[in-house]
């Protein structure tokens, strides 16, 4: 696997055009806008920086890293244990749906476009139930893509997708969206570094109760553009 090959695959897998339905999820951003918690670029950057470093980004980054390491070493029992933990480690039903649906879709299309026996085997063992960070980590590991490169790309795509949701929901202009993404570069890097330093998933947790509250509120929000 050359760097050019790895970059090509990551750009494809993490593109908004990859058919996993990422555009239909806001990860609580829609409710944060509705409740006046996110109203402009500055408040969006503050919100997403916390989600990355203290919330879902922190947890999913750690799960991604440990899943990649297990798959890279052929430890499928360990990988399946991480996959099971990732499926359970969701604060609300919408968060669970968001990650499971995208993960299953990612694994399905990747098995067709970039096939590998270990992707098929994981699909059979897990009966198609897999969260997005674990699915992307698996694909990256079995295709020989370095962990830091793959996880950095994953976290960038996570942030970019939520910014896209905010551009539509606030609404923000496209320029403000790109300025927000640039402002989050440090938060993405720190989240990556923290994830790579994890040695025990039992020591990882979140500190974003307001994010969970927004997700719970979204289930009964009167008007909705997104599924979460």
Image (cartoon, rainbow, N blue to C red):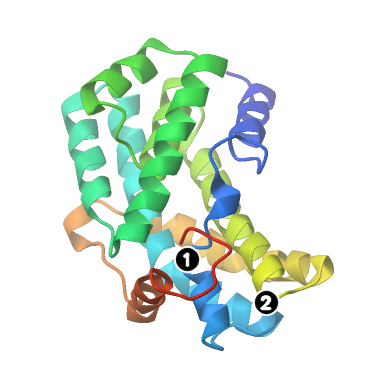
In percent of the image, x 31 and y 38: which residue is there? 67
Q: Position of residue 219 (x, y in %)?
A: 38, 68
Does 42 appear above or below 16? Answer: below
Q: Circle 1: is it few (<14), some (14-19), or many (20+) Cα within 10 Å?
A: many
Q: Return the mark for residue 170.
A: 2
Q: Residue furthest front?
A: 222
SS class of the residue under badge 2? loop
Horizontal relation, residue 14 to residue 171: left or right: left
In percent of the image, x 20 and y 47: which residue is there? 85
Horizontal relation, residue 13 to residue 88: left or right: right
Q: Is residue 86 visible?
A: yes
Q: Residue furthest top?
A: 117
Horizontal relation, residue 58 to residue 11: left or right: left
Horizontal relation, residue 227 to residue 56: left or right: right
Q: Position of residue 108 (x, y in %)?
A: 45, 25
Q: Return the mark for residue 198.
A: none
Q: Is residue 200 visible?
A: no
In percent of the image, x 35 and y 42: which residue is there? 131
In percent of the image, x 52 and y 15: which residue is there? 112
> Which residue has dot 1 on it?
52
Name which of mark 1 and mark 2 comes first in the sequence: 1
Q: Position of residue 158 (x, y in %)?
A: 54, 54
Q: How many marks?
A: 2
Asked which quadrant contains residue 21, the reply is top right
Work out whether residue 36 or residue 72 is closer to the camera in this orientation and state it.
36
Q: Position of residue 154 (x, y in %)?
A: 53, 46
- CA distance for labels 1 and 2: 20 Å
């Amino acid at each position: 696997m050359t760097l050019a090959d790895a970059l090509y695959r990551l750009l494809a897998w993490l593109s908004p055009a990859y058919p996993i339905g990422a555009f239909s999820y806001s990860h609580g951003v829609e409710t944060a806008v509705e409740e006046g918690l996110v109203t402009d670029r500055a408040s969006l950057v503050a919100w997403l920086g916390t989600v990355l470093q203290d919330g879902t980004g922190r947890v999913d980054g750690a799960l991604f890293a440990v899943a990649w390491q297990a798959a890279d070493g052929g430890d499928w029992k360990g990988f399946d244990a991480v996959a099971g933990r990732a499926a359970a480690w969701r604060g609300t039903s919408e968060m669970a749906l968001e990650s499971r649906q995208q993960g299953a879709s990612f694994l399905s299309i990747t098995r067709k476009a970039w096939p590998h026996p270990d992707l098929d085997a994981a699909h059979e063992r897990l009966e198609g139930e897999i969260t997005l960070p674990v699915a992307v980590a698996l694909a990256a590991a079995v295709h020989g893509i370095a962990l830091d490169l793959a996880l950095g790309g994953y976290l960038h795509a996570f942030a970019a997708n939520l910014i896209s949701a905010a551009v539509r929901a606030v609404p923000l202009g496209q320029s403000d969206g790109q300025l927000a993404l640039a402002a989050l570069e440090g938060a993405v890097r720190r989240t990556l570094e923290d994830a790579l330093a994890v040695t025990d998933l039992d020591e990882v947790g979140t500190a974003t109760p307001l994010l969970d509250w927004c997700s719970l509120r979204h289930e009964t929000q009167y008007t909705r553009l997104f599924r979460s």
